[in-house]
């Protein structure tokens, strides 16, 4: 009966990915793992949401409502089961200036517009462009984010009431010393040891949840005076209610919120899609980028109308979920619902959880997230790739994720273009009829155009010259201009130039540029040859 009920539940909410039991039905054991994983994630979400709300300059419930709504919607319709979304520091550091200058109502309006932009990106299927992010950029991304997560936990090693939480580090405040510091470090280490040992003994309970539970029981049972969740802020509240942002509906408002909305949408999608790829590598899943864009957009649009600060995918909580065994939408859904339960009913208990236990969980996330193998391969990979890994890591730490990824992609693209440009070359030989053939090798594009022109010896070549592109490709307008330049040189010397073996896409490119194409009997596979003189009259006929 239990299996039948669970299968009916999966059918009701249309979650076919939950059917992972060998019999094709939803396993009771799987649901137990998913529920416990969701509870673990919810406990870790509380201090993060409160901290990021402080970063943005808004109340703690604004962050908690965002974590609940964004987490709930993306769990239901997101592109990768097992991913966790909520309020994040990457977005909070952008929001702080908007809230300070214009107030919280403009933040809500910005979050709504941010969501609409993300929905548009999903509908237009722009999420697929995340595949253009090179692997060295991904390594730099996870390394930088691991360092940022580590630095963010340092704020908990400061005295309650003196901590100024920041997006990338510990901020200002007075550090703990003496016995308070020793207890904080000891409880953090205890939690980490429990998380490390538990999988070697049992997998009935997720290791992070057991670590939090044992440490909390120890602190409460012994009455230890250590920082707890309640020292950050009270998390008690009611259900989020519909709230239309109270801003003037005019062009001036749009001018204020649009730049912030575009930046937030870009950062949110980049972080979400990179997390989607990372979780996909760990769980063996593929695709879902455009669906994730739409899910993030719907979640943020709804959040803006219910008093939340918006959010995106959270790599730290996603790693907690995956490492705890969460693989389906149930874990994300459970995390969001448990978070709401904490807000409505569980605040007195949750506020007694020691921060050290949550810091220990996040430190284990840092250890698991950092790509330690990247340190070994730095000396073995090409110098450019090693540079990109380090560059993206550093920029992620000192700036933000979006900037780091953009910089990494640009540097990688420039390096590729430079290497491809050096591959242009030609082998030349004479035909029995006395014509000289240049057999081009390598791609012809903006980076190799000058090198292509330098291949030809116009002065000493015979009257008939053939350029064979069988081992090359004409890529862009710069390549066409280079061909034009070579043709002009041979025309000035009174010599005839013919192009052969252009691929069909190159054929179309030349047609769009206005060049006349002629079928060639000696080119049956490609059915393409180009004779500039036929169209322009400046060269000899075919």
Image (cartoon, grey):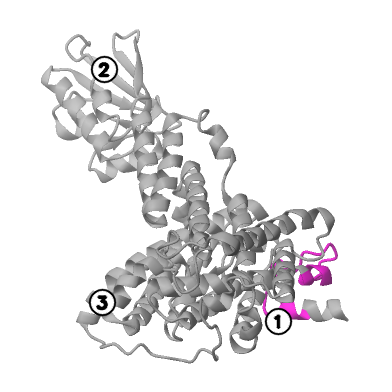
Quarter of the image for residue 113 reads bottom left
- Assign a secondary structure to mark 3: helix
Q: Is residue 250 above or below residue 514?
A: below
The magenta segment is 8-32
Q: In this view, does 3 lie above or below 156?
A: below
Residue denoted by label 2: 465
- Does the residue at mark 2 contact the one at mark 3 (Cβ under 8 Å)? no
Q: Outermost residue, left direction?
A: 492
Horizontal and vertical percent position of residue 379? 51, 28
Front one among 397 and 432 = 397
Q: Outermost residue, right direction?
A: 1
Residue denoted by label 3: 101
Q: Can residue 286 be seen in this view?
A: no
Q: Residue at x 54, y 37 (%)?
A: 375
Q: Give the alpha-carbon distance from disc 2 to disc 3, as whole Å.
A: 68 Å
Q: How crowded is mark 1: few (under 14 residues within 10 Å), some or many (20 or more)?
A: few
Residue denoted by label 1: 12
Quarter of the image for residue 218 reads bottom right
């Amino acid at each position: 009966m239990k299996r039948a009920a669970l299968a009916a539940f999966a059918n009701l909410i249309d979650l076919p990915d939950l059917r992972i039991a060998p019999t094709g039905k939803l396993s009771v054991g799987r649901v137990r793992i998913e529920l416990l994983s969701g509870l673990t994630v919810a406990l870790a979400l509380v201090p993060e949401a409160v901290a990021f709300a402080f970063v943005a300059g808004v109340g703690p419930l604004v962050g908690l409502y965002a974590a609940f709504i964004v987490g709930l919607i993306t769990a239901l319709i997101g592109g990768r089961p097992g991913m966790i979304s909520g309020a994040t520091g990457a977005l909070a550091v952008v929001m702080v200036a908007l809230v300070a200058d214009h107030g919280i109502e403009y933040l809500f309006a910005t979050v709504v517009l941010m969501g609409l932009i993300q929905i548009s990106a999903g509908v237009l299927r722009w999420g697929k462009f995340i595949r253009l992010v090179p692997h060295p950029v991904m390594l730099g991304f996870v390394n930088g984010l691991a360092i940022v997560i580590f630095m963010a936990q340092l704020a908990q090693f400061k005295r309650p009431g003196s901590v100024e939480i920041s997006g990338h580090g510990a901020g200002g405040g007075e550090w703990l010393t003496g016995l308070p510091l020793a207890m904080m470090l000891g409880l953090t280490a205890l939690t980490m040891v429990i998380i490390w040992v538990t999988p070697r003994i049992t997998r009935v309970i997720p290791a992070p949840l057991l670590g939090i539970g044992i440490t909390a029981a120890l602190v409460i049972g012994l009455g230890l005076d250590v920082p707890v969740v309640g020292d950050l802020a009270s998390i008690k509240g009611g259900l989020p209610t519909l709230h239309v942002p109270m801003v003037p509906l005019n062009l001036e408002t749009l001018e204020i919120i649009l730049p912030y909305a575009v930046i937030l949408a870009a950062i949110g999608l980049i972080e979400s899609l990179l997390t989607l790829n990372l979780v996909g590598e760990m769980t063996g899943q593929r695709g879902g980028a455009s669906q994730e864009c739409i899910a993030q957009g719907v979640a943020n649009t709804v959040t803006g109308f219910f008093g939340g600060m918006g959010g995106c995918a959270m790599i730290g909580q996603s790693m907690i979920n995956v490492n705890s065994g969460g693989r389906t939408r149930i874990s994300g859904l459970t995390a969001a619902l448990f978070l709401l339960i904490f807000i409505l009913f569980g605040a007195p208990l949750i506020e007694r959880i020691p921060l050290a236990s949550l810091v220990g969980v996040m430190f284990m996330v840092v250890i698991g997230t950092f790509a330690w193998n990247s340190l070994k391969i730095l000396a073995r990979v090409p110098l450019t790739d090693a540079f990109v890994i380090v560059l993206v890591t550093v920029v992620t730490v000192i700036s933000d994720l979006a900037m780091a990824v953009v910089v990494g992609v640009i540097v990688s693209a420039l390096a590729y273009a430079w290497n491809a440009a050096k591959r242009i070359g030609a082998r030349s030989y004479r035909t029995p009829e006395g014509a000289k053939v240049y057999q081009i090798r390598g791609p012809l594009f903006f980076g190799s155009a000058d090198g292509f022109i330098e291949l030809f010896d116009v002065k000493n070549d015979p009257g008939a010259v053939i350029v064979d592109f069988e081992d090359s490709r004409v890529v862009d307008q710069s390549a066409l201009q280079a061909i034009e330049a070579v043709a002009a040189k041979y025309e000035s010397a009174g010599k005839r130039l013919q192009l052969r073996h252009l691929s069909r896409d190159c054929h179309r490119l030349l047609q769009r540029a206005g060049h006349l194409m002629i079928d060639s009997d000696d080119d049956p596979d490609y059915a393409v040859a180009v004779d500039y003189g036929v169209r322009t009259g400046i060269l000899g006929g075919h």
